Image (cartoon, rainbow, N blue to C red):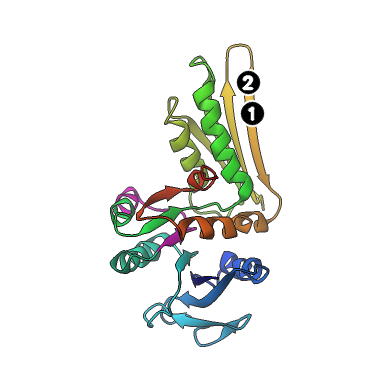
Amino acid sequence: MIRVNLFGICGRMGRMTVSEIAGLEDVTIVAGIERDGHPEIGTFIESIPIIANSDDLPEADVWLDFSFASPAVEHVRQAAVIGKPVLLATTGYSIAELEELQELSKHCPVLMASNLSAGVGVLESISMQAARMLPTSFEAGIFELHHIAKKDSPSGTALRLAERIAEYAPRPGIASMRAGGAIGEHQVRFVGVNEELVLIHRAWSRRAFSSGIERALKFIVKQPAGYYMTQDIYSVE
């Protein structure tokens, strides 16, 4: 049984994660953690106690973070002291914060998974393969669409796709659009002189973003200290 401490349990994705994990036989949430002063501290969500960030955390095998960038970095600082695996499902990190996370990952396993959708994980892997296999005459580009309230632009997923493609080809540009209630779409386009390859992932429900939680948790809990990305999950047989 994998025991999980869930940071940001009261947010939209945190609550959805509770529902997702409730259906799993070998994963359980020990406690939900929220910022000090949060009005729901001391209550329960589906029998899971909600405690303050400053409280002593119960023993768990992995920490799953759906909070925000700055508090997530602080959580990883704490995890690094005890070597605790952390699954970061947050976005919006600054360059300095990303550099610090990479440094902290020398002391604990850190999985950067801003999008836990199983389909996005496969999109990332296929995009890397396409960048490696296509002739250099093809140019890559990324388009991403999200709801109008999404704060970060480009999305963390688009930035990660660009980073991985850049391992085999020139780094692609990213076009972002924020409109209406769009859940999330990512297109990776490889444009040649006479042909084009288009890879598309569309999320029809926010539940798509939690569909890969079990696989991600089972991956990171077994890893040594290091900095891991979503595509690494799909590189392991």
Picture residue at 66% right of the left edge, 58% below the top: 207
Furthest-bottom residue in view?
42
Q: Which mark is residue 198?
A: 1
Work out whether residue 7 or residue 91 is closer to the camera in this orientation and state it. Answer: 7
Decide: is 183 above or below 87.
above
Residue extent of the magenta highlight: 85-99
Furthest-top residue in view?
194
Q: Quadrant of residue 108?
A: bottom left
Picture residue at 65% right of the left edge, 54% below the top: 208
Decide: is 10 above or below 211.
below
Which structural element holds mark 2? Answer: strand
Characterize the local packing of mark 2: few (<14), some (14-19) or many (20 or more) Cα atoms within 10 angstroms. few
Picture residue at 55% right of the left edge, 74% below the top: 29
Q: Which mark is residue 102?
A: none
Task: Report x, y in % for residue 232.
Answer: 48, 45
Q: Is residue 196 left or right of residue 4?
A: right
Pointer 2 with pointer 1, Cβ within 8 A? yes
In space, the residues marked 2 and 1 are separated at their CA atoms by 6 Å
Can the viewer see residue 145?
no
Task: Report x, y in % for residue 177.
Answer: 58, 42
